[in-house]
Amino acid sequence: MYMYHLVLLFAVTAVHITSAQIKYTEYMRQREELLKKEQRRRIGGTLVLNDDEQKVNRILMHEKRKEYEDSRLHGKLFPPAISFFKSKPMIDESNVFKLIRRMPKGGVLHLHDSAMFNLTWLITNFTYSPHCYMCYDDNNRLIFRFLPDDHDNKRCQWIKVNELRQTAWDNDAFDKMLVNNITLITPTPDTTYPTLNDVWRKFGAYFGIVGGLLHHAPVRKAVLQETLRQFLADNVQYIEFRSSFSELYELDGSRRSRSWFIEMYRDVINQFTREHPDFIGAKVINAVFRRQSRDTILSTIKTAIGYRKTYGNFFAGFDIVGQEGRGKTLLHFIDEFLYARQQVPPLDLPYVFHAGETDWGETQVDDNLIDAILLNTTRIGHGYALHKHPEVLNIVYDRDIGIVVSPISNQVLKLVKDLRNHPAAALISSNYPIVISSDDPATWDATPLSHDFYMAFMGLAGEDADLTFLKQLAMNSIKYSAMTKTEKKAAYGIWQSSWNRFILDVLQNDWPHYIPIIG
């Protein structure tokens, strides 16, 4: 009898274990299925990597998880969670960042031509000119100007920059002083810029200072040439940038027209593209400040329509720029923005609007998103407030309207401190049409695109987002560009060739100490 009960006990126990095991297995199956569904939904979730890409991905993810664990488990500062002014040296030492720098990243679609170059390069190359002068105006703002020796410009007490430099104990220190006076960079961002308006005030001053250098025609041409070189060196192959096409001046005081400005840009870009087969090209977007009058906006729109006819797709569209929270809304200019479509037949002028670059929800400011959509914007610049507009989000998704996110810009200009909390993180997880851009890298000393890609990869995307995410971002930059279908097809081919070389370079040359990891 005892043996009977013992056998029965074993049998019951075995049944119980099997039942529990079945429940556990089913639970884990459901869990794995749910995780895979979420992974497939995010940007890049449906991409399939080939064998070589998978090897590079293992290298990349080893480094990414190491950085995550250093912060999450061991308390090391996490770069996307702190100000870029403090995190940049950490990022520059990151192996993830070093891989991203080598990666062909496609294009930058949201950029301003007065802030898209390395500022130190500008200062060291042009303020040494014997004709470069500087002064401080009545508001103690720095001003530059190129002037002939016999100038009679009474705007300031001008002094040659070289003469001031000679009084300094060190040329490099003097140049660094100039750079620090122009950029937003500070070791104490929270106290230097306690409010959003404070940082925007300094941001606006930057453009006034560099304008005196950039509005000199020879400098502007050289800056564009160098900008293209810097972007290609950062493995960016395509650019769309905004410009107001201000009249440029020559040393003798004569003026270059806006048409000359556009044609100079076109010719420089075409020549650079011919000389560099890996470079796809660039296009321009006309931008005007949102604080202008309605008459000025309408006049600029009419001029832009003429440029579109003259320069075709090279002239990619029209936008208004400036601090959204304190500027005039799109609705304020609604009659002017409707002008082109009200003509018979409608006139061709694509809009590429900044919209929703604000954390003031349900105000006339973030309602710019409503008007941008109704005005058929081809892309949305920033779109920080999009998550507060579910109907707009649905339209963006259904119409496949590109959302161009600039992580570092949004952090530096005080929309978000910790980039893990950026609203775009949710859009990335749901495969919204996101493109990553750099906005104004000169003002905070960022690379043309790599720093922003790093922030998107490490901060906006989660720990499991891998090479498929980065690859899809690069492809998105081509898909949502202003290129024609024919141009996009050619661009994909150029980018794919560069991507294939990147994969092979990593495996063959750059990371031998990771051979045991990649197998």
Image: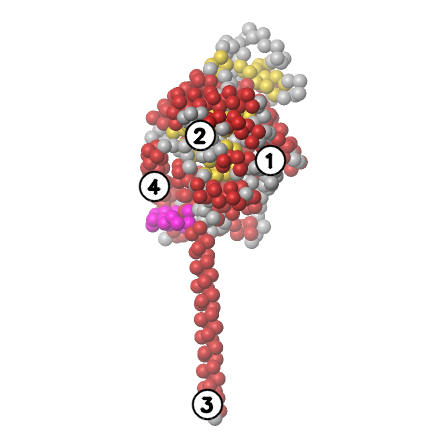
Q: CA distance from mark 4 to mark 3?
A: 70 Å
CA–CA distance between discs 2 and 1?
Answer: 23 Å
Residue at point 54% right, 43% down?
389
Eye-nearest disc, 4 or 3: 3
Q: Please state which amino acid type lies under the numbered disc 4.
A: Asn
Image location (x, y in percent) of residue 398: 44, 43
Residue 56 lies in magenta, yes or no? yes
Binning the other alpha carbons within 10 Å of mark 2 as few (below 14), some (14 to 19) or many (20 upward) gives many
In this orientation, does residue 431 appear?
yes
Label whose residue precedes the other's in the sequence (1 or 3): 3
Name the residue furthest top: 150
Residue that numbered label 4 is attached to: 500
Q: Is residue 206 visible?
A: no
Q: Of 269 and 177, which appears nearest the observer?
A: 269
- Tell me the SS state at disc 2: loop
Q: What span is in magenta?
A: 44-58
Q: CA distance from mark 4 to mark 1?
A: 47 Å
Q: What residue does disc 3 label?
A: 4
* Mark 2 or mark 3: whose residue is earlier in sequence: 3
Are the two marked residues, 4 and 1, in contact with CB atoms closer than 8 angstroms?
Answer: no
Quarter-of-image position of residue 278: top left
Type of amino acid at the residue the image marks with label 1: Gln
Which mark is in front, 1 or 3? 1
Q: Which residue is mark 2?
A: 350
Q: The residue under label 3 is which amino acid type?
A: Tyr
* Residue marked by disc 1: 364
Label 2 amino acid? Pro
Looking at the image, tell me whether mark 4 or mark 3 is earlier in sequence order.
3
